[in-house]
Amino acid sequence: MKASHPGLLEVIIYNPKKKNAIGTPPEKMIGDIIKQASDDTNVKVILIHGGRFYSSGNDLSLFTTTEPD
């Protein structure tokens, strides 16, 4: 996470081993970052990206370890 321009909060997802798949820990972390940013009047834009890697979406391996409701 870094502020490269005034008003911009840049969040870089870096998990190349999983092709930047989003799972439970990153989802919670992103949610916490957004909550903190919403309380900061200096933040106008949140940019979430995978740097030079794309994001493959959800981490499907979580579905094999999660108990159904």
Image: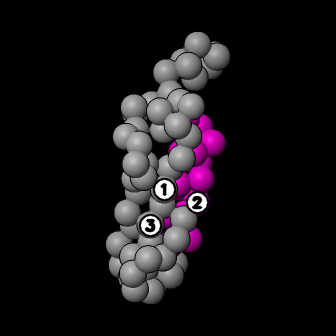
Determine the residue positioned at 48% across, 56% down.
12
**Mark 2 touching mark 3, by CB under 8 A?**
no
Q: Is 33 part of what is drawn in magenta?
A: yes
**Residue placed most toward the observer, 33 or 49:** 49
Q: Could you say whether the residue bearing mark 1 is in a helix, strand or loop? A: strand
**Mark 3 touching mark 1, by CB under 8 A?**
yes
Mark 2: few/some/many CA within 10 Å (<14, 14-19, 20+):
few
Q: Which residue is mark 3?
A: 10
Mark 2 to mark 3: distance in Å? 14 Å
Looking at the rendered structure, the kind of residue marked 2 is Asp
Q: Of label 2 and label 1, which has the lower sequence position?
A: 1
**Mark 2 touching mark 1, by CB under 8 A?**
no
Q: Could you say whether the residue bearing mark 3 is in a helix, strand or loop? A: strand
Q: Which residue is mark 2?
A: 32
Residue 24 versus residue 2 in the image, above or below: above
Q: Of label 2 and label 3, which has the lower sequence position?
A: 3
Percent across and percent down for residue 58 are 45, 31
Q: Which of label 2 and label 1 is nearer to you?
A: 1
Q: Which residue is mark 1?
A: 12
Specify the segment rendered in magenta. Answer: 21-38
Q: Could you say whether the residue bearing mark 2 is in a helix, strand or loop? A: helix
Looking at the rendered structure, the kind of residue marked 3 is Glu
Mark linked to residue 22: none
Quadrant where the C terminus sits is top right
**Residue placed most toward the observer, 17 or 36:** 17
